[in-house]
Image (cartoon, rainbow, N blue to C red):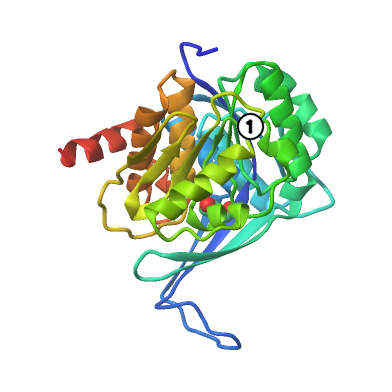
Amino acid sequence: MNHATPKVTVVGSLNIDLVCHATRRPDKGETLIGDAFDIFTGGKGFNQATAAARLGAEVTLVGSVGADPFAEILLTAVENEHINSRFVTKRTDIGTGVATIVIEPDGDNSIIVVPRANMALTTADIHAAVDCIADADVLLLQLETPIAASEHAAAIAKQHGTTVVLNPAPAQPLPDSLLGFVDILTPNQSETELLSGMKVSSHEEAHRAAEVLRARMVATENAAVVLTLGAQGALILTETTSQQVPALPVGPIDTTGAGDAFCGALATALASGETLRPAVAFANAAGAAAVTVIGATPSMPTRAKIERLLESEK
Ligand code: RIB
């Protein structure tokens, strides 16, 4: 399709992130005094939608929130990012999704997500957004909303020639009926291990596991696996090629949302007509930029920030 302005539709979660900074994660049964506390907007869906919008895409977010003050914060944030919020449905019987996050001094995080309203997203909600999915260049999905909703969205996308990108996070087993609609799968190391049932501790193992995953996407021509490997960059596996795209070396402050910046940037680059390797290089830079800022949504980079980072690496 490739419109003058790239169009990305995201079906995904919206959460409020409750973030504690501490010297370490508490042990079982232990109460620990932390160093700082923040409340941020988040949710993999909203973060990825924000990344795409900040990078110049026209973005529609399809999701579900509760009827509580958290929902108002999120809906205002969606508007502020110039994301189409028409298909973010408000539920009256359930609360908005939340995530409790612990950040350690090295920037690493642990997250518990309680999806609440995110899991109330229905295939009827997806159907209401059919035109926005059919008209998009890229449909971007994650796994914090029901699989049935994602599968319905992916089926619509495939009927209309919209590229389907699935970020299989948080990790969970996936039906072949969904994978069969996916053009590009973007698991990280642990998601790859869960989905393939194989260990991923070397380049060779990563390659073999990506091959296993790609074989499950056979219904899609040109299916590709883009395996994100943190500081080792990303491994691209297509029918004809296997390429490693290096990461940019940055000192992480907070890694929360780095994968979301990667996926939002990848979707935007592909929606702009970019081919896979340069799109992944751009996405790597977006992920690197994100780890230098505290908070998930706040860390989604602008194009100017990515360009400055790429310039400083020359
Ligand atoms: O990927 C980071 C996100 O995961 C956080 O914003 C949190 O809400 C969880 O969904």
Q: Secondary structure at mark 1?
A: loop
Going by the numbered disc 1, the residue's amino acid type is Val
Q: Is residue 187 visible?
A: no
Q: Position of residue 43 (x, y in %)?
A: 58, 49
Horizontal arrangement in the rendering, residue 297 relative to residue 212 (left or right): left
What residue is at 83 percent from the left and 32 percent from the top? 124
Mark 1, residues whose alpha carbon is within 10 Å: few (<14), some, or many (≥20)?
some
Q: How many marks?
A: 1
Horizontal arrangement in the rendering, residue 109 relative to residue 290 (left or right): right
Q: Position of residue 24 (x, y in %)?
A: 43, 78
What residue is at 55 percent from the left and 12 percent from the top? 1
Horizontal arrangement in the rendering, residue 207 relative to residue 121 (left or right): left
Query: Which residue matches tag 1?
Result: 218
**Of 163 and 42, which appears nearest the observer?**
163
Judge whether 73 appears above or below 32 on screen.
Answer: above
Judge whether 236 appears above or below 252 on screen.
Answer: above
